[in-house]
Image (cartoon, coloured by chain):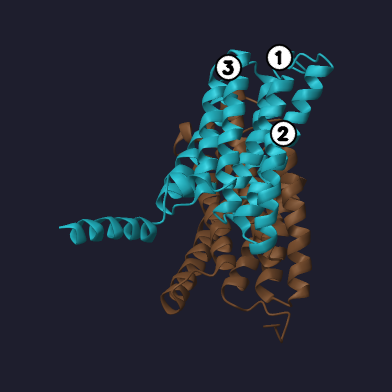
Chain colours: A brown, B cyan
Amino acid sequence: MAEDIFLTNLRFSGYILSAILIPMAAIILGRKLYKEKSITGTYNRIKLITFGIFFCFATMSILELIVEMNWFPLLGQIFGFNIDTVNLYSILIGTMVSLGLTMVFYANRFEVLYYSALMFFAGMIFFYYFTGFDAWLEGYIYLAGAISLIFMYLTSFRIKDNGALGLAIFFTLVFSVLVLGVPYITQVIIIAYNGFILIFSLGLFKPFKQEVE
Amino acid sequence: MAFCILTLIPVLKSWRDTKNRMYMAVLILTFGIIGYSLINLFTFILEVDTNAYLIGGLRIGYILGYILATIQFEFMLYLRRFIKFYTLPFIIAFYLLFGNILVVNSLPFIIYLSFVGFVPAYFLIRDGKRKHNGLAFGMGLLFLIWGIGQTIPVTIVVEIFRITAIIVFFLGTRGFYEKYLFPVKEEEERIMGTWISKLVVKE
């Protein structure tokens, strides 16, 4: 009984923390992006994609909290909470991993592939609405997530970029929640990635002292 | 196919001289049409029924149609330098092909082929007319006539339309439209000037 209460509290703490910290990180990133745009006149594509990922993640965190608290019961049905079929949750996760792949393509200047992942994922959603087929969605999310993470680590070490490495660690934690699904461990990981995003947003995460320009 | 091969020669020459990407795109498209015609020829010789279902609702004719549509779409993207969208025709063809396996419905195939046929035709004819580019104009007519032919479900009519389309395209590569449809303005003015001056002298 006590164990159940502890687990529930831990879960709610994780959801509340995520619903506060992730949108905050998204706002900080958005502000930085806007400031840079007003100075240079153009958006930095990598930062724009990072903002896109955080925006999706922030939306997901807020919706997760609303669904968990059962404030809007109807939302729970649309949201889904699983990635084996098309619902709001899988669409958001899928968009995030597709953006992750897009970021990898941008960082490595594979111009032909820039929008490929996003177009492929959009095709998958349309395909579901026209045929009802969604068997490859879960596989795509895992595969795209794993590929983008591997390449994110490789890119971050290659260009010695603190931002890229920070994102890679953050998304490894997020991704492990999706893959593991073990109650205690996932709740601890949720709190851990919230703590990490706080450190990252405040600019305290600097493993590479001298970054390559 | 014979006209396509005849088309290849001047285009290849022009590409070698100018290295213009338009000629390169036309070359790729012409090779595509030759390949398509070859497959069609083999299916005809081997008496393969292109309307037969392979898996689910997928027909051999659909596969051929998607190959040609992908080449056409890719051609337009290459011409407009939309490098970031180069994979789009392949993604669309992949989903439509897979969709045909799951669902027996030819509507997505027809809509996609119409889109890929008529939209580029409109832009090519418009741009060709504006810029007095006979090659682009010919390409536009090729897409248009070929596309109209595809909508008529009578084999002989389809073939006539296809041959007409290729002849029209061939004329475009030979500079027919520049010569007879879009004469150079200065040349026109020069002729007009001579004609008027002759009248003035006479008076």
Please tell me which residue is depicted at 73% across the width and 29% down the height of the picture. Answer: B37
Q: Mark 3 points at which residue?
A: B157
Of the numbered discs 1 and 2, the one sitting upstream in the chain is 2
Discs 1 and 3 lie in a common subunit: yes
At which x and y percent is residue B178?
48, 49
Q: Which amino acid does label 2 sit on?
A: Ala
Q: Which of marks 1 and 3 is in front?
A: 3
Which residue is at 62% across, 24% downward?
A132
Reading the image, the residue beneath label 1 is: B51
Are marks 1 and 2 in one subunit? yes
Nearer to me, A179 or A37 = A37
Say if B87 sits above or below B58 in the image: below
Which chain does the numbered disc 3 sit on? B
What is the three-letter code of the residue carrying label 1? Answer: Asn
Looking at numbered disc 3 in the image, what kind of residue is underneath it? Val
Q: Which is nearer the eye, B169 or B91? A: B169
The quarter of the rendered structure image containing the C terminus of chain B is: bottom left
The vertical placement of A26 against B92, above or below, is: below
In this rendering, would B155 be left or right of A30? right
* Residue at disc 2, secondary structure: helix
- Residue A65 visible here: no
> Which chain letter goes with mark 1?
B
The reply to whether dot 3 and dot 2 touch (C-beta < 8 Å) is no
Pointer 2: what residue?
Answer: B2
- For the residues labelled 1 and 3, the Cα–Cα distance comes to 17 Å
Return the residue nearer the eye: A146 or B88: B88
Which of the 4 image quadrants contains residue B106? top right
Labels 1 and 3: the sequence-earlier one:
1
